[in-house]
Amino acid sequence: MDSPSLEDLEAFIVASKRLSYVGGGAPVLSYRQGSHDLQHADGDFVYHDSYFGGTDFAGEEVVYWRGRPVWAENYFGHILAPDQITGERTGQVIRSSLTKMYAEGRFLGGFESTDGDCDYHDTSVGDATWFQGREWIDRAGRTVYELHYHGGLVRD
């Protein structure tokens, strides 16, 4: 088999996202100066998330299958209203909301969740083969945080 099934790939992506950043996974040795790196492996699959920054951040997730990159996602997130929300609170809302979405066995397709006084939103188009999307947090009717992401299959 030259590549994993799309079903297996998607299941691995969801599990990896759930167990790494959202699940408080232990960091691994940084591959790039100043990066924060997380990793998850299962069988022929390895997931690596590497990002820079904290309150405002950029990163990339890559899934390897049998040592070859087969899927990737890039993202950039930032706080729009630092007088309304902290980086710590933003992370709490994101983790809480994504935990609920990943429990549904997916990472795309739109999602909404409320965490205290914050409303989390995610919209996307496409599927695991090619996608783009935006997540954001509203607080008291104002968008206080947003992240843009895109990705899909990586082919030779």
Image (spheres, rainbow, N blue to C red):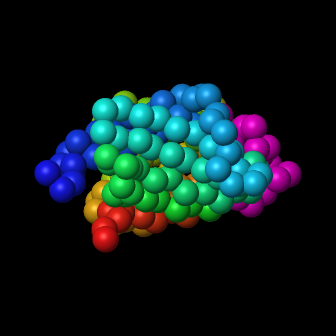
56 or 155, which lies in front? 155
Percent coordinates x, y for residue 68 in the rendering: 36, 55
Tell me: 136 left or right of 112.
Answer: right
Asked if residue 85 is among those painted magenta in the image, a careful observer would answer: yes
Magenta residue span: 78-92
The percent position of residue 94, horizontal first and vertical second, equals 58, 41
Residue drawn at x 38%, y 57% is 69
**98 is within the stretch colored magenta:** no
Quarter holding residue 29 = top right
Which residue is at 42% across, 64% downward? Answer: 151
Horizontal placement of 142 versus 111: left or right? Answer: right
Report if residue 63 is visible in the image: yes
Q: Residue at x 55, y 47 (%)?
A: 49
Residue 156, above or below 28: below
**Residue 24, how many percent across, how many down?**
60, 28
Q: Residue furthest bottom?
A: 156
Drawn side of residue 89 relative to residue 18, left or right:
right
Residue 56's spot in the image, x, y percent? 74, 56
Q: Nearer the viewer, residue 71 or 143?
A: 71
Residue 135 vertical placement versus 116 (above, below): below
Residue at 41%, 41% (x, y): give it. 46
Badge count: 0
Horizontal arrangement in the rendering, residue 140 relative to residue 133 (left or right): right
Tell me: residue 119, above or below residue 70: above
